[in-house]
Structures are given as C-alpha cells and as structure tokens.
Amino acid sequence: MVILKKIQKTGNSISADYYPDGEDVKGFMKISIEDGTILEHHNASPFSAPHVLRELKRLARSEHPPKERRVLWY
C-alpha cells in the first residue's frame, strides 16, 4: 500500500508526495503528462515507486484528480 498526498496537476506535469505503507517516510514523484517520463523523484521505497508511477499516469488522464489517493496491490 502507498498513500499519495498533495496530488497536483499543473500544465504538463502531475506530482505527489507518497508514503509507503502509510508510514512517516515521504517520497516525491513528478511525471510528464505528455509521455509519462519521470521528471523528478525522491525515492522513499523502491518497491512502492512503480505503483506511484502507474497511479500518477492514470490520474493524469483525469481533468480534476483528487488531492489524496490510497493505492493497494497484492
């Protein structure tokens, strides 16, 4: 599980702070909306990062993404 907070979509990018397993350790990822490439990344968990990337790509298609999102996988 990872929690995305402060999701912001601006111009040609989308970004979020993320908290793996709901812990206090914070990461940050910013991607290009156009092609999904990572523009900036402060890695908090190499296991959670691919899930954050996939969710940001999905949220980029939304006109008004939520400010917070919980991502679960199994």
Image (cartoon, rainbow, N blue to C red):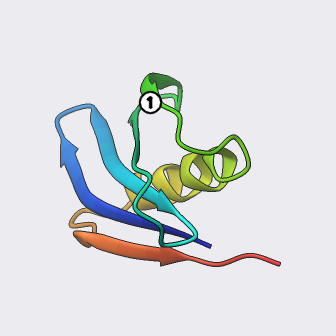
Is residue 40 or residue 43 the one in the foreground? Answer: 43
Of helix, strand and loop, which one carries label 1?
strand
**Image point (65%, 53%), residue name:** 48
Is residue 15 or residue 18 the one in the foreground? Answer: 18
Mark 1 nearby-residue class (10 Å; few <14, some 14–19, many ≥20):
few
Q: Residue furthest top?
A: 39
Q: In the picture shown, does residue 46 fall above or below 47? A: above
Picture coordinates of residue 69, whole percent (x, y): 39, 74
**Image point (73%, 49%), residue name:** 47
Picture coordinates of residue 56, whole percent (x, y): 46, 52
Q: Quadrant of the C terminus?
A: bottom right
**Image point (17%, 35%), residue name:** 11
Is residue 26 or residue 64 the one in the foreground? Answer: 26
Residue 5, quarter of the rendered image: bottom left
The answer to whether 7 appears left or right of 26 in the picture is left
Residue 12, quarter of the rendered image: top left
**Label 1 sits on residue:** 42
The answer to whether 22 appears left or right of 50 in the picture is left
Residue 41, quarter of the rendered image: top left
Q: Quadrant of the N terminus?
A: bottom right
Q: Residue furthest left?
A: 10
Marks counted in the figure total: 1
- Dot 1 amino acid type: His
The answer to whether 74 appears left or right of 18 in the picture is right
Residue 32 visible in the picture: no
Q: Residue furthest right?
A: 74
Picture coordinates of residue 52, whole percent (x, y): 55, 53
**Image point (22%, 48%), residue name:** 9
Residue 18 visible in the picture: yes
